Image (spheres, grey):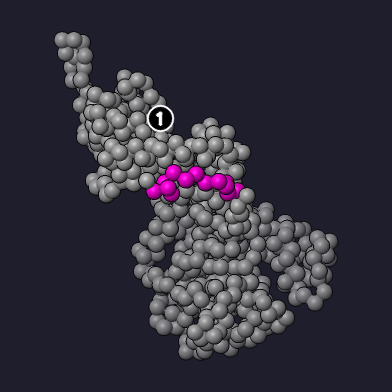
Amino acid sequence: MDSSLTEVPKQQTVPEKKMAEENPEQRDVGMHEAARREKLEKIRALGFDPWGTRFDAHQPIGSVRSREDEIRTDPENADGKAEQHGPQVRVAGRIVLQRRKGKLIFADLQDWTGKIQLFIGKNQVGDSNWELAQLLDLSDIVGADGELKRTRTGELTIFVERLHFLTKSLLPPPEKHHGMTDPELRQRMRYLDLVHTEGVSDRFLDRTRIVRSIRRTLDAQDFAEIEGPTLHSIAGGAAARPFKTHHNALDIPLFMRIALELHLKRLLVGGFERVYELGRVYRNEGISPKHNPEFTMLEVYQAYGNYETMMDLTEKIIIDALAACDRGPQVGWGEGQIDFSAPFARRTYDDLFAEHTGVDPGNSTEVAALAESIGFETAGKHPDVIKNEVFEAKVEDALVGPVFVIDYPASICPLTKRKADDPQIAERFELFVQGMEVANAYTELNDPDLQEELFRTQLEGQKEEDSMAKMDHDFVRALRHGMPPAGGLGIGIDRLVMLLTGSPSIRDVILFPLLRPEQDA
């Protein structure tokens, strides 16, 4: 026998030790693994492959459960018994619960669509399958053929006629009543979290439904989905610190993209009138319940539209996504609810500033005094930068929403068209829900000379390691070839999924959030 099959690990990693602390049954992981490896060899000896093989034609458990109305009960016979007859079904999944009673085994089988009870009886499956059933452990993956019926207690059950062994689990699952309560452990070992924590799998499947719905909504309006580069020679399109890398063959520095914007707008110049990308973006910044350094963005650009066009589109994207998850406009959030009924409120930046600070947003002296009382430095800063710092500190957290905050100070919006009747105001909105910015949109600036001037103004005083510390001359050149008037929209997908699923942290909706490297004990 290959010695690697029976060797027991001598060290536990940090996650394994955490599981042992949370779960008394995990403290003897090595002993459990040795016992499971012994069963693995017995499975081989019975002539079964412990790692399984192709298993065709199995049905999702959720679909099997929907066939309950096909079960028929015959009239009672002379012995006073009534026979049940149900459809023949085939399922596959992971064993998450077992109960043994003599020559009977009841097991709960789970796949990504649901859970169902298996009835395994020695008389029903035969000697070979019964011997195999004695070797089953929690978390083993099996297939089953049988008849769908109800037990005497009314439990929907598959009465197994043939058992198929598909994969042996060598490590025990978290103990049922303790589960996985440590957030870092759940994120690091997401594969266990998905199986053993109630609602987690459903939440991530909802994320898939939301993303699929977004594509459907945009495709139905003739937007073309594209894939832009993730390696950029200039980090542009947003104010953020990038991750740096190096291309050896060309011997040049490159940046992981911090935004999708500038390449998509080049496509507007190239004649793509409606275009979008759903892609990963990377920002070398902090981690919090609202931030992860790697996240998913949707950016959309529509020629001949403006920021009002983008407000209408944002509402439709969100309402369609809720419908795709079989939810109405009311979404639970903490102890309350968020009402996503359209139309969303639209409030100007200055009105909200005055309402929540009690200070006239046009009085730069009073705004600066308020900023200093909060603890902000004001020396050498543009008055609108100071005002925006106060807005972020005093207003944003109070925006329960959903609310479109419209008409930002133009000086802090270098990629945005100004209002025709007031060039100090930019045609920009941000959508806020529960104090979080979820979407950001502009009437796009397409004047190349003004764009170049604003880039130069923004670059003054920028630190070399920060983004947009270099002019994107090619983008300005593209504008000189003519970009149509357009509306542009960016939505943070992770935050949107948080809100639509009622999840309190962004790490609850990212399958594999960034974590510190795992250390051996």
SS state under label 1: strand
Number of on-image labels: 1
Residue 130 position within the rendered picture, expressed as x and y whole percent measured from the top left = 29, 29
Residue 183 in view in this figure: yes
Q: Residue at x 40, y 51 (%)?
A: 324
Residue 237 position within the rendered picture, expressed as x and y whole percent measured from the top left = 57, 75
Would you say 61 lies left or right of 511 here? Answer: left
Q: Is residue 10 highlighted in magenta? A: yes
Q: Residue at x 26, y 43 (%)?
A: 58
From what the image shows, is residue 46 above or below residue 341?
above
Residue 194 position within the rendered picture, expressed as x and y whole percent measured from the top left = 47, 45
Q: Amino acid at mark 1?
A: Gln
Give whichever of 327, 311 is nearer the camera: 327
Q: Residue at x 43, y 79 (%)?
A: 267
Q: Residues within 10 Å of mark 1 (few under 14, many from 20)?
A: some
Span shown in magenta: 2-14
Give the main secondary structure, helix, strand or loop, of the magenta stretch. loop
Give whichever of 437, 463 is nearer the camera: 463
Q: Is residue 85 highlighted in magenta? A: no
Q: Which residue is mark 1?
A: 98
Give whichever of 454, 187 is nearer the camera: 187
Kindly give the residue lying farthest to the top in the view shown: 79
Q: Residue at x 38, y 71 (%)?
A: 224
Residue 481 position within the rendered picture, expressed as x and y whole percent measured from the top left = 47, 89
Give whichever of 324, 20 is nearer the camera: 20
Would you say 141 lies left or right of 444 here? Answer: left
Would you say 352 lies left or right of 118 here? Answer: right
